[in-house]
Amino acid sequence: MGILRGLLKFVGGGLVGAAVGAVAAVLLAPQSGPELQAEIKARLAAAQQARTDAEEATTRELQEKFRVEVHDPDAFKPRVGLP
């Protein structure tokens, strides 16, 4: 009987702990599911925009550096009338 009683206490403690944890999670959660998803999507969009901006800035910087190195201010600029 001692082993069964110990097992029941252990399982009961686990269930109580799980219930307390679930209640705490619901009460302390900063946002609901849809709100959290919207925030994640907004942060992802901002990160993608930041990547695009950084890529464009780096491209401009490297093109300008190349123009200086080859002494050609028109390098990488579209040329009209050429195939």
Image: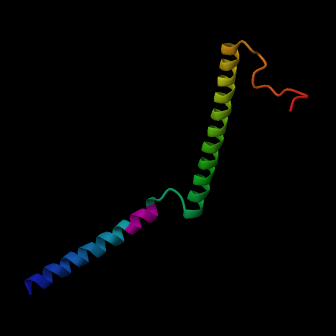
Residue 7: quarter of image: bottom left
Left-right relation of 83 to 64? right
Query: Residue 24 in the image: x percent, y percent?
Result: 39, 63
Toward the viewer: 83 or 32?
Answer: 83
Residue 56: quarter of image: top right
Q: Residue at x 66, y 39 (%)?
A: 52
Left-right relation of 46 to 71? left
- Name the image quarter holding the C terminus: top right
Query: Residue 63 in the image: x percent, y percent?
Result: 69, 23
- Name the image quarter holding the N terminus: bottom left
Residue 71 on the magenta span: no
- Which residue reaches farthest left? 2
Q: Residue at x 62, y 56 (%)?
A: 38
Up-down: is 67 above or below 10?
above
Q: Residue at x 60, y 49 (%)?
A: 44
Report the predominant secondary structure element of the magenta stretch: helix
Residue 24 on the magenta span: yes
Toward the viewer: 8 or 75?
Answer: 75
Residue 6: quarter of image: bottom left
Query: Residue 49 in the image: x percent, y percent?
Result: 66, 41
Q: Residue at x 89, y 27 (%)?
A: 80
Start-end of magenta stretch: 22-27
- Which residue reaches farthest bottom? 1
Query: Residue 54 in the image: x percent, y percent?
Result: 63, 33
